[in-house]
Amino acid sequence: MKYKTLHLQLRFLLPLIATLIVVAYLAVHLMDGMTLRWFSRDVNSRGTLVANALSDSVAEAIDTSRLERLRPLFDRTVKGERLFAIGLCSPDGRLLLATSAFPGTLTCRAALELSEQIDPRLALTGGAVHVGVHDVMGHLAAHDAAQQANAAEDADAGPPALLGRLVLVHDMSFIELRSQDSRRYLIGLIAVLGLVFAVLTVVVAQLSWRGWVKGVRAIMRGEGLLSPLQTSADLAPFAADVRARLRDLEDEFRRQQGPQAEWTAQRLRTLLGTQLSGDQVIVVSNREPYIHERSDDGIVVKRPASGLVTAVEPVMRACSGTWIAHGSGSADREVVDSADRVRVPPGDDDYWLRRVWLTPEEEQGYYYGFANEGLWPLCHVAHVRPVFRESDWAAYRAVNQRFADAVVAEARSEDPIVLVQDYHFALLPAMVREKLPMATVLTFWHIPWPNPESFGICPWRREILQGMLGSTILGFHTRYHCKNFIETVDRYLEARIEHEHSTIAYQEKETLVESYPISIAWPSEQAAAAWPSIAECRRRVSERLALPADACIAVGVDRFDYTKGILERLNAVERMLEKWPGWIGRFVFVQVAAPTRGALDEYSAFQDRVQRVAKRINERFGRPGYQPVHLLAFHHEHDEVTELFRAADICVVTSLHDGMNLVCKEFVAARDDDLGVLILSRFAGAARELAEALIVNPYHVEETADALNRAATMPLAEQRERMASLRSTVREYNVFRWAGRMLNDAGRWRLRARIEARVRRHQAD
Ligand code: F6P
């Protein structure tokens, strides 16, 4: 800061000093000229006086031809300080008499010529002299008394004649001396003035700099704008500008810094090793992370299109342990050992996948029936009626028990950590607790939880709530879902609810109900470095789908599910092309729709409807070489989805209701170029975290169509602003943080349980 002040002052002082030097130079010259003119005038008039005083004597001496009599007179006259020499010239220019110092080089003619100049100076070896020539006029007088008397009478008779010329050579050294003196005084004066100005400038600069700094600080604190006395209206826009710029810098700094203590796989492993002292982790989910399928090329391994798998798999790789899931692949049985286990991921073998086999009837009743025709539409308010069948409920109970037994069989201790995933296993927590009362059961509900009225239509609402309350910790994506769950328990069970701590005590057992927003694993630097460039991704996608070269590409990537708002999205695309026909031929919408639950009527009817709408739009707006909608209703591997995300200008997520939605986070993670626009439904849990997306109500076709147009025309700078911020959020709030927070809470809970058990033992002793 000091350096800055100095710099600022120098910027004031240097021009001042330069100006003073120029002024001093000009003033000295001006003063020299003036001094010279003053003294010349002075010397001239003094010369005239001297000449007048001498003229009579000179005239007489000339008249009497006794010039030598003038010498003592001349010598006396030059004794004065300023007269250097005197010479007497005849009218025809001969030097008749001169004092000893009279310059030998100065002839009468030269003296006459010199004296007629403005500056009659003559340079001699001892210094400069001033040369003045004065005429001596008069009448030649008679030499006797009679002649004198006549002459006196005749004195006025004729004009006086030129008798001679007096050449007065004045000493100029005193002028030089005086000139030097005044020059010194003048320079001294200017120097003093300069010094005074400099000191004044420094003082004023210091004061005003401090004032500015104080003022700007006040403005930064927002004080200046509150008090009109402190900040004038003129300064208000400046203050706003400075604040905005500082915020920009802060944001930039934050983005570059990254999160304070980023959650990573390693940090999660450390947490497990310390807080949970390396306890066994068992995951239970319906969908398995790796599916072995038989194909013409032999057995192939597939990754399912599942948000749950996307989130939990990296956690499992970090924790090791065992993942129990339904073995649904056609070749799954061929690769497991005698205990139905296989090491995955293939090649890395980080953890065990334990497969549970279901009969088609079990799968029909438990998975398609109760889970996806009952609970799924019940929890997603997407205007599809839930169907509850007694047989489905029986299958659901039985399968939950099968999985609970598998957990007990896999447990190597009496208190494993069991991570139960989703609505397929609402009964399992209580079942596990019955067999393993010391286990820590963390249940995460991946879909929304409805309000008590909506949930109340389930005939087995009490059983489901009781089953879930077997959990130690029950997690939802948002506080809103936690609140709905607690209110539902309050409505249908006799439980003690501690709203302050968000706990429910039911039948001597306490459950913590907490929100843990799920996320994805942020791509590692190596993974991102292996991605093809954005241009290459665009080229490949354009080539594969035969897209126009300059197409604006919007993508949607979902399971082919009625909750995802795919129909509403297509309607919005149609409306956009209708409202802005300029996009026809240039705007392309690519929808990846991964096949899911196709055996259910609701799903097959929905999927047929989407196909029809896509066809209608293509017929309406398509041209030779241009197809506005590309519906890709088949499985895409993770790499292919990443390629599509990187090729896209826009990603559209318009779920009608979604617990979180990880597709939007995957899109953000794939855009390491900080470009691309995310359109996100306000009914997806992710909308609470990803505020820089264009948030829409997917039911409002016009609003979504407008958002599509806005995204397609968004300037790159705005895209960068939004995307950089989205990326920093997703990076910080990653899946390791999700798991870490849950496991942290579990660690604290286990510690508390152990302390309570010890206290009880002491009391018993
Ligand atoms: O969206 C909730 C969710 O449970 C996801 O976690 C999971 O990907 C999906 O639903 C279930 O899909 P599927 O029935 O194909 O396993």
Image (cartoon, helix red, strand yellow):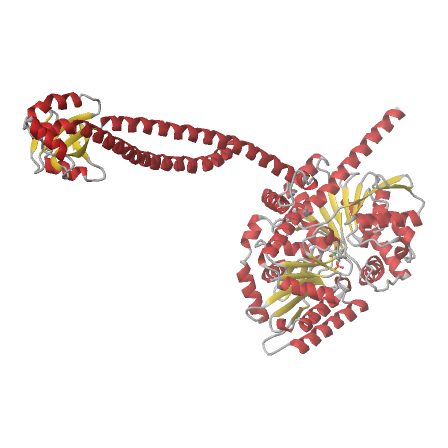
Residue 594 seen in this snapshot? no
Q: Quadrant of the C terminus?
A: top right
Note whether 527 is above or below 12 in the view shown.
below
Closest to the observer: 273 or 236?
236
Q: Give coordinates of residue 46: x percent, y percent.
A: 23, 29
Residue 28 rendering spot, x and y as whole percentages:
33, 34
Point out the quarter of the image occupied by ligand 1: bottom right
Farthest right residue in view = 494
**Depth check, front residue: 438 or 146:** 146
Q: How many marks?
A: 0
In the rendered image, residue 729, in percent from the top left (x then y), is placed at 66, 48
Where's residue 483, x and y in %? 84, 48
Q: Viewer-proximal residue, 439 or 17? A: 17
The reply to whether residue 691 is in sight is yes
Residue occupying image coordinates x 81% and y 69%: 601
- Residue at the (8%, 32%) spot, across then down: 95
At x 58%, y 53%, the residue is 672
Looking at the image, which residue is at 75% across and 72% down? Answer: 608
- From this view, report whether residue 488 is shown above or below residue 579: above
216 to the left or right of 205: right
Seen in the picture, residue 106 relative to 392 is either above or below; the reply is: above
Most foreground residue, 614 or 493? 614
Q: Is residue 513 left or right of residue 202?
A: right
